């Protein structure tokens, strides 16, 4: 799982894309009001929605490195692989494993989605105000991104088994 937050403003707040598959398709996302704590709260809500009982890793940026967020993740059997602040709650027991570095590299997939949403889909400056209206713009833009991504995946040459 990978969590990244987008830049928020008074029009709709930050957005969060969650759990990007290896093929680059976003599984979950939402728009929240910009309160300073909305992105981690939205990530915890999306963790609660995700099925499965086994322990899974979650990669995120420095904005998610807080005691409360890490505690919530561990309560839900999620291993936090966060980009660490100088005064971090994550210790070497988590960061020494190669999976932590892999989670941080996978964050680039989410950044690619945000780049497309901001430049191509026009979400850098939303035309509407409010979480509900920006939320439907976000959903429509992510659906359009999925169509473009699927076109790219379907036109890719199949690899030979030799």
Image: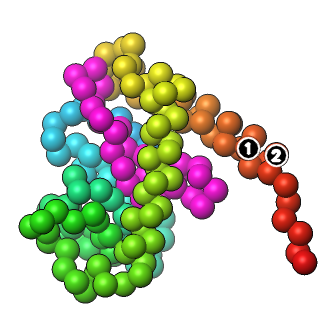
Residue at image point 43% right, 25% down: 123
Establish if 72 lies above or below 94: above
Indicate the position of residue 114 as horizontal and vertical percent values. Answer: 45, 39
Q: Secondary structure at mark 2?
A: helix
Q: Nearer the viewer, residue 67 or 122?
A: 122
**Residue 141 numbered tag:** none
Establish if 44 lies above or below 99: above
| Crowd tier of the residue under label 1, counting other residues whose Cα lies within 10 Å: few below 14, some 14–19, many 20 or above | few
Q: Are marks 2 and 1 in contact (CB under 8 Å)?
A: yes
On the question of residue 137 being in view, the answer is no
Side of 63 relative to 27 (left or right): left
Separation of disc 2 and disc 1 at Cα?
A: 5 Å
Residue range (magenta): 1-28
Picture quadrant of residue 120 = top right
Q: Which residue is mark 2?
A: 155
Picture quadrant of residue 84 = bottom left
Q: Nearer the viewer, residue 115 or 16?
A: 115
Establish if 148 lies above or below 71: above
Q: Which residue is mark 1?
A: 152
Quarter that holds the N terminus: bottom left
Indicate the position of residue 68 as horizontal and vertical percent values. Answer: 14, 62
* Residue 114 magenta: no
| Crowd tier of the residue under label 2, counting other residues whose Cα lies within 10 Å: few below 14, some 14–19, many 20 or above | few
Indicate the position of residue 75 as horizontal and vertical percent values. Answer: 25, 72
Quarter that holds the C terminus: bottom right
């Amino acid at each position: 799982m990978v969590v990244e937050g987008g830049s928020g403003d008074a029009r709709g707040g930050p957005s969060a894309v969650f759990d990007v598959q290896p093929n680059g398709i976003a599984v979950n996302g939402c728009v929240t009001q910009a309160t300073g704590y909305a992105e981690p709260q939205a990530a915890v809500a999306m963790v609660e929605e995700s099925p499965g009982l086994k322990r899974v890793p979650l990669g995120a940026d420095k904005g998610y490195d807080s005691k409360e967020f890490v505690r919530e993740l561990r309560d839900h059997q999620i291993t936090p692989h966060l980009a660490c602040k100088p005064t971090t709650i994550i210790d070497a027991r988590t960061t020494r494993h190669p999976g932590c570095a892999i989670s941080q590299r996978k964050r680039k997939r989410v950044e690619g989605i945000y780049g497309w949403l901001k430049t191509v889909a026009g979400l850098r400056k939303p035309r509407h105000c409010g979480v509900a209206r920006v939320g439907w713009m976000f959903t429509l833009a992510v659906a359009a991104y999925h169509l473009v991504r699927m076109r790219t995946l379907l036109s890719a040459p199949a690899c030979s088994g030799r």
